[in-house]
Each structure stands twice: as C-alpha cells, then as structure tokens.
Amino acid sequence: MARTIHTNTKRGIALVSSLTIAGLALAGCAGGSGDSGEESGDTLKLWHYEGADSAMGKAWAEAIDIFEEETGATVEFEEKSFEQIQKTASQVLDTDAAPDLMEFNKGNATAGFLASTGLITDISGAVDEYGWADKLAPSLQTTAKYSEDGVMGGDTWYGIPNYGEFVGVYYNKDAFAAAGLEIPTTYDEFVDVLDAFVAQGVTPLAEAGAEYPLGQLWYQLALSSADRQFVNDYQLYENPVDWQGDEITSATETLQEYVDKGYIASDVSSIKAEDAGVAFINGTAPIFVSGSWWYGRFVSEATGFDWTMTAFPGADLSLGSSGNLWVVPENASNKELAYEFIDITMRPEIQAIIGNNGGVPVAADPADITDEKSAELIATFNGILDDDGLSFYPDWPAPGFYDVIVQELQGLVTGVQDVETTNANLGEQYDEGTAEFR
C-alpha cells in the first residue's frame, strides 16, 4: 500500500487534497438501476474509493449484500476515485446530486471543512442510537468529532471510522537470531540492539529522509518523552508548543545521534520511503520504523525471513489515527438508510473481513481473526488503543508542514544546521500555519 501523506490545509481555501494516494481507483460495481422513477426511499446512493481487492473494498461489498437483504433497499454505488471526491465534494454536496453516504478523509481541511460549512450532517443522534461511541477508542473519536470551526477533537460527531492505522517497529527475527539478539521491549534495549548491530558492521535502521519515514521517527522520539497534553497542544492547538522544550529537543538531538552513531545510513537525506521499505524486504536492514500500511506488502514480499511488528518500545504514545470516515451529506435523501449501512460495517463479521485481509479493524472480535499475521497486527493496534495511544501524524497541524519537516530534518542529518536551528525553523513554520486556529 502506498503511504498516505496527511497534510491539513486552512479551512478558508479551496478543498483540494495535498495527499498522494496510489491505487485507490474504484472498480465499478453498481447495484440498482439508478432510474429517476425509482422511489428515493428504496435506494441508498453510496460513494467510496476503496479498491475492490482491498480489505475495506471486500468488507464493504459484503456489507452491501447484507444491507440489501435486510432492508429491501437497493444500493446505488457510483464509481469514484479519491481525487474526484476530494476535489468536487464541496460543490456536489451542495446540490441534489449529493450521495446519501460517502467515504471522506479525516482531518481539519477535509471532513472538518465540510462540517464547518454545513455540507455534512451532525450525526450525534445516530451515534447515540446505534452505540458507535462504545466501539471507538477516544483517540479514534478525535478524528470523527469537530468543533464549529472544523477543528478535530470537538464535541460534535460528523463521521464514523471503521478501520485504523498506526506506526510501529518491524523486526527481522532471523537477523536478530543470527546476531544473538532479542527483540527489545524497552527503549534502552532498543538502543542496545542498535549498538550491537553497528558493532557487527550492520546499519540497523531502514530509513528515508527524502520522504515521510524520517519525520515519523522524529515525532515518535518526541512522543516517547511526551504525554497526551503535548499531543493535544501540538495537534489540537490547546496551548502553544514549546519548540525548544524537552520533547522536541530530545527528539531532534536523538535523531542527530542516530546518524552520528551509524544507526541510520549517512546518505539518509536522499533515500525515499520505497527504498527504505525494500531494504527491509530484502534483508539489508533488520529494523524499520513505519506504518501498518506496509504490513500486507511485507506478508507478500518479505518471505525470505521471519519478521514481526510491535509498538515502539517504551512509548505510551504512537503515531496513528482512525482510517477515513463515513460521512452523511446534509442534502442526503436517505439519512436513516445511511445510518443503517454504517452500522452494518461496524458489525463483527464485517470487521473480521477487514482484519483477515490486511486491514486494521476498529471493532473486531479477536476470535474472528483467523489469519495469524493479521491477528498479530490487530493485537498490537488494540494495545495502543487500550492505552489511548494514537497521536496522529507530525505534519497534520499546519498546511504544507509535511514538506517543512522533510526539509528541516534533511538539514539536520546532513549537518547543514544544528538542533536549535532546526527546532526554531520548524516552530516558525508551525506557528505561521496554525495561527488562524489559535
């Protein structure tokens, strides 16, 4: 799966995605004729952009069958792409052509924008009626609830996610065994492992400074010494972020040390995410800090050795979030049918399809997950949820901040600038980009 780059944009500008998503073109499979003479009460107009062979695509296809059988209504499913929905939503949703239910990206610039402009429905009543809040951990609820200004973490429900994602650590178990090492369970053990591999002439961490992985490692290092209030300040603008404070200074200093000590390749600034992932797949690097979106690919391609994935050792907080949201347009003709469909996607049998096909369900019964690797992934995710550990992504708070993080960390690891300058530059761009929300 290609990595989704999360970048929020100010509410006042046009709703244009800065995300890059590969392979999400939707295979058409319309159910129902869409005849204008058909009674609107018997038809649910549904848009989503998951591929037919993806975990969510398979799960939602089954949900459509169940919905039609149980309700007697027809699902009219139109072929859309991620880009089509992102770029046209603010225009289409303000007309009678709006669907009854659609998948939409979470975040301030996307679902938050639609919420603040009245284009999607406050579904708080349906959340109470169906008990969806009981199935979603607090950190998953954050991306589904928005303030009147469209900032996530508000009091009003505007969407429901039914899958998630997170960043952890992938370990090549065969490489560890050959080196006489154990998978670390604490941060000190993690550093000891890094030192041991370097002593054996191995660069232990697959990393990429030309794209997202290095920034995610940097944010994880900050989270390792942070608490939930730091996350709320950084992501939800509750208080000013101290860019020379302990959390960020420790992260930036530690990242520099990782390069200086040989934990990360000296040319990391020019390496892309694909290169880092392939370095793990081919066994060149025994450790990779990245997201659950790699998991299915590793199952298919990293077959020459045994491997595992855990949460970052010693940290209570992890990068991650809910998946995209089901949202109900304000102009939807059949909101009650939309709520019934959402509820079906939250059922254990549908959640199990997501889980057994490489996805990360939010409300699956562990007993329903029959694939061993999938069960391992979901158990790790559930452990993070149990600790209220999902802490979103470092580039989310400010427009264009993804590129800023990449550039500034490149300057750090190449020695062009020191820790203090890196933090100051990051803070200046963050403050400028979040000014309207604070």
Image (cartoon, rainbow, N blue to C red):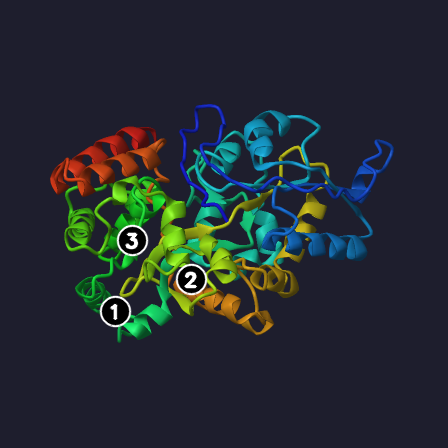
What is the CA distance from the residue labelled 3 to the residue labelled 1?
14 Å
Question: Is the residue marked by circle 2 packed among few (<14), some (14-19), or many (20+) residues within 10 Å?
Answer: many
Residue 147's mark? none
426 and 307: which one is in front? Answer: 307
Which amino acid is tagged 1?
Answer: Thr
Whether residue 413 is visible: yes
- The answer to whether the residues at label 3 and label 1 have Cβ atoms under 8 Å apart is no
Q: Position of residue 374 (x, y in %)?
A: 52, 66
Q: Is residue 306 left or right of residue 251?
A: right
Provide the residue designation for mark 1.
Answer: 186
Q: Is residue 416 left or right of residue 384?
A: left
Provide the residue designation for mark 2.
Answer: 385
Q: Earlier in the sequence, mark 2 or mark 1?
A: 1
Task: Determine whether the residue tagged by mark 1 lies in a helix, strand or loop.
Answer: loop
Task: Determine whether the residue tagged by mark 2 lies in a helix, strand or loop.
Answer: helix
Q: Position of residue 375 (x, y in %)?
A: 51, 69
Which amino acid is tagged 3?
Answer: Gln
Provide the residue designation for mark 3.
Answer: 220
Which residue occupies 27% across, 28% down?
A: 432
- The answer to whether the residues at label 2 and label 1 have Cβ atoms under 8 Å apart is no
In what quadrant of the picture does the C terminus appear? Answer: top left
Q: Position of residue 390 (x, y in %)?
A: 38, 55
Please, is residue 396 above or below residue 137 in the view? above
Q: Is residue 107 left or right of residue 262?
A: right
